[in-house]
Amino acid sequence: MKTLTRTTVVSLLAVVALITGTSVAFAQETKTLKEALKGKFLIGTAVNTRQASGRDKAGVRVIQKQFNAIVAENCMKSQEIHPKENRYNFAQADEFVAFGEKNNMAITGHTLIWHSQLSPWFCVDENGKNVSPEVLKKRMKDHITTIVKRYKGRIKGWDVVNEAISGGGNDGEGFYVLESASNAGANAANNFYWQDYLGSEDYARIVVAAARKYYAENGGVKPLKLFINDYNLEYDNHKAKSLVHWIEKWESDGVTKIDGIGTQMHVTYRANAADQQKQEERVVNMFEILAKSGKLVKVSELDMGYMDESGTMVLTKDMTEEQHKAMAEYYKFIVKKYFEIIPVAQQYGITQWCATDAPGAPGDSNWRGGEPVGLWDSNYNRKHTYAGFADGLAGK
């Protein structure tokens, strides 16, 4: 067999780079994301059922090698895990938890209560009419009890309430109101807004109290971390301020304790330089707002698309190498600002929501279908975005 020289190897990497859009320098990079981070906090990814079950073998290898934390993509949402009042579907959630434990990863449950992807039976009686607040509270508590009890402290962090803050209105104190059927527009028919029935202050308190109670009663030893998770905080800084305000209001009873804030960060790089600069300023502002809250801060669902000068989202198949590089720089910027602005004691971790680029096309069932949202392409080849992400973690 002919021995390959270093020159030959680099030449082959150059060919791979032309095909995959990966630079030669980075194609030789061997440091993983965990290694780049050097154990400073959790670096995670969302895991789907094909990965948790082991069917996506390439995905499993990447996740095992690169990450020390995982979050459930869909299998713990109400409509998946609790489709009928007296029937739970734990098979996929059990696989997910077992996958995390087998690989010695921190596990985040996502999510206990959300107005979306909620099983229809939760809020109506056998005649299809809304149930009373008392029945609703019982069903909520039963749901939380059963799930928290099943995993008996194996899951030590939960997105306890998801996407509670609206993007508008005025609560009388200058902050946005909570999500409600009255301000949801076309989405109102497909969602159920707990606060409309249990009260804006009480509904979050009920969830937090139940999660803590049943965690402690069912084998939970290590401190349970409960997060309020929301989106667009980096785009609408007043929403970030409103979220902090509502957490303070929920905790004003002296009993409720919320440990941290999850900022999703489904971001977009904008080719228009002025627009991109404004967006980067908003990212900085958001981190400053969250840092001042004193809460743990995690970037919970980070992914990225690319918008051209005309305002059109660019699909993966149409991306140029320069566009990939621009996205890499934005990833580096976000991660570095997290390090710089969030105090060490408040740094909980960063989760990359999409390991690979999204399959499909815009408008289909896949998240950000057809967009270049991953750090790897669909064949698990590293992209420039991986380099930017890793460089940010390494402090470069």
Image (spheres, grey):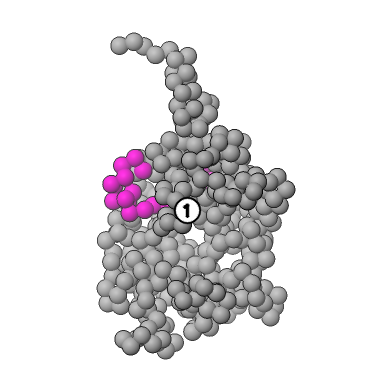
Residue drawn where x is 44% and y is 15% of the image: 8
- Residue placed farthest to the right in the image? 274
Q: Secondary structure at mark 1?
A: loop
Residue drawn where x is 41% and y is 50% of the image: 360
Foreground pick, 324 / 393: 324
- Say if the magenta span includes residue 168: no
Foreground pick, 256 / 176: 176
| Image position of 23 with respect to 369: above or below | above
Q: Amino acid at mark 1?
A: Pro
For the C terminus, give its image quadrant.
top right
| Image position of 118 with respect to 329: above or below | below
Residue under label 1, please give it: 362
- Say if the magenta span includes residue 52: yes
Side of 299 where 117 appears, left or right: left
**Residue 330 image offset from top left, x and y in percent:** 61, 44
Magenta stretch in the rendered image = 37-59
**Residue 386 image offset from top left, x and y in percent:** 51, 39
**Residue 291 image offset from top left, x and y in percent:** 64, 58
Label 1 packing within 10 angstroms: few (<14), some (14-19), many (20+)? some
**Residue 310 image offset from top left, x and y in percent:** 64, 48
Q: Is residue 15 visible?
A: yes
For the N terminus, give its image quadrant.
top left
Side of 243 where 78 appears, left or right: left
Q: Is residue 355 visible?
A: no
Residue drawn where x is 70% and y is 45% of the image: 273
